[in-house]
Image (cartoon, rainbow, N blue to C red):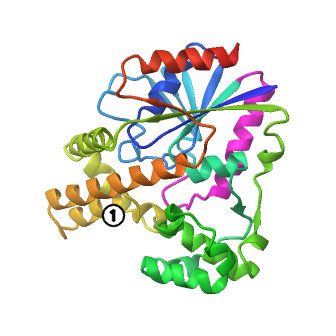
Amino acid sequence: MRKLLVIVGPTGSGKTSLALNLLDKVNAEIVSADSRQVYKRLDYITNKLGANDDGLNIKRRDGFWIQDGKAINLYDVVDITQTYSVSRFIKDAIGVLDTLWSSGKDAFLVGGTGFYIDALLGRVPFGNVPADNDLRANLLNYELSRLQSRLKNLDERFFMQLSSSELQNKQRLIRYIEIATYAGNVKSGQEWSPLKTRIGVDVDVKHIGLKANNAMLYEKSDKWIDWLTKTTFFKKELSLVKNTKNVSETLIKGMIFREGLDWLDGKMSLEEAKSIMKGRLHRYIRSQLRWFGYNKQIDWFDISANGWRQKVEEKVLRWYS
């Protein structure tokens, strides 16, 4: 039976750091589940690299990194002109997992993009409907309430079953509208993850979650933004995005990039941009915690508690033994 350790938690909780340390004890590789770290040439704004990573020995390859001799898969998968979707993630992740398991290695699925993780594990459905870029471009201009109203008109039964987190997620609502428009209703246009048939049959899944109180998580994210915006990498990566034609709309509308580009264009001061970034990141952290909170299989560890890393390691190693 193959084992899949899933490490989740909000931005800044130390998921990747924990996973890298555990690789010293387990014959495994990391499979990243992050919707932004798949982009090439964007290492700092997407938080693949941080303030304490200057001394790392990193070998970049298409689709993965070797960091101090340890593999992190699904880094640097696509160019910034490409749109990355949950369907693409499912395909890429299954390919990596099959390769690892065939070679006798286990895998750590690590990330904060809860929809990607749950779609892969079969906890939520993902759409088999192809992307409609014209429809998406139009819907991006809609206010949240208008998106909700449109989805309700298309598929009221599905709409009434959505969680509060999903109702506040514009990208998710746009995708549901896209599916319902194409297939008549959301259910008809969805399929379960191909990995779902393997869960509970030949794959043993263990969920570990990292959390802290909101004040601590906000402080950590604020310090990261303060550090990031002082670096030369911040302006360099923003300039790359600005000067590249046909950059993915999903990317440039996302956190950090939208405010950063407005600052680069002189539309706001750096302090104004930082304030908006921090507020959006706080909301995203709350959204991540709500999303992961629905999964009752997660064993949670408070990163503010003494000895939490040792407790995680002991639990994981007992599970592997």
Q: Magenta part mainly helix, strand or loop?
A: helix
Of the 4 image quadrants, the one containing the N terminus is top right
Q: Quadrant of residue 264?
A: bottom left
Q: Residue at x 72, y 22 (%)?
A: 105
Q: Is residue 189 left or right of residue 270?
A: right
Quadrant in which the C terminus appears: top right
Q: Residue at x 26, y 43 (%)?
A: 228
- Residue 263's x, y, as percent? 21, 63
- Above or below, 249 against 149 in this view is above
Find disc 1 in the rendering and name its residue.
258
Magenta region includes residue 99: yes
Q: Nearer the viewer, residue 283 or 263?
A: 283
The structure residue drawn at horizontal position 77% and vertical position 56%, both measured from the top left corner, is 192
Q: Which residues are magenta?
A: 78-105
Q: Position of residue 299 (x, y in %)?
A: 56, 32
- Secondary structure under the numbered disc 1 in the rendered image: helix
